[in-house]
Amino acid sequence: MHHGGASVQPVDEDGEPVVDPISGGKVIGTALGDGPDQWQEGYGKLVRKGSQFTFGIHYNKQPGPGTGVWDQSSIAIKWHTEPVKHVVRSAGISTRGWEIPPQTRDWEVGAARTFDKDMVILNMMPHMHWRGQKARYELIYPNGMRETLLDVSNYDFSWQMTYTYKEPKFIPAGSRLEVTMAFDNSDQNKWVRDPEHAVGWGSMTVDEMNIGWTEYANATPIDDLENYDFGDVGTGVEDIVGE
């Protein structure tokens, strides 16, 4: 299995999909070596009444007879009995359109997201494929100070861990989160089948990805979700590195 997860789509009274600023998108996701998503008390994801759930499992199976296996994946969701005060949302900080040259190590690409409201970061999960070497999350504060939040120096596709704070990490409005990842597309990487060819973004394990999954929530507790101004949350994702 490559990864699995569930997403939710809010709908209107006629059952048509709608855009909701605080509900919709990824509810839960996991990959090789990862554990369950767990948040502190008072934190949770909002699922509107009538929303549609989509469960997806991504397999990477070799073709041919005798290669089939049974899968017993399952998903469990805990429902809060009391309204949450912090709405958890997921951001996949990423960029596309890049290509790793043949026989190249330590090739970097990155993306960033700027938050326009005070937020807290709950966890981070870097996602790459077989060529992934390392990943780094850095926060640039409004005053220019730079802080490393996560530095995975020896990434392993078989152990894609979610790194969770014991206490949510406060980030002030205007802070920029940069996620930089490095790849090894050379014959020094035992997982690369053909290092003489360039590789770009793709859904197959033999392709590559650079997704800096990040879960975050409003820093200030909310009593009235419907009338709270969540702002733009992020000002978009920008390319920051790529050669």
Image (tube, grey):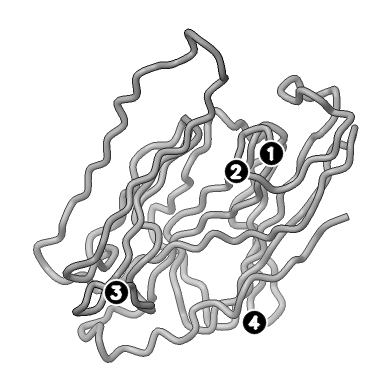
Q: Are marks 4 and 3 in contact (CB under 8 Å)?
A: no
Task: Tell me the amino acid under the disc marked 3.
Answer: Glu
- x and y percent of residue 54 in the render? 32, 53
CA–CA distance in space, label 4 to label 3: 40 Å
Instruction: Give whichever of 160, 47 is nearer the camera.
Output: 47
Relative vertical location of residue 32 with respect to residue 28 in this rendering, above or below: above
Q: Are marks 1 and 4 in contact (CB under 8 Å)?
A: no
Pick whichever of labels 4 and 2 is earlier in the sequence.
4
**Residue with the mark numbered 3:** 16
Per the image, label 4 sits on a secondary structure element best described as loop
**Residue with the mark numbered 1:** 207
Give the residue at x 52% y 55%: 213
Local crowd size for mark 3, using a 10 Å CA cut-off: few (<14), some (14–19), many (≥20):
few
**Residue with the mark numbered 4:** 142
**Residue with the mark numbered 2:** 203
Which image quadrant for residue 241? Answer: bottom right
Task: Tell me the amino acid under the disc marked 1.
Answer: Asp
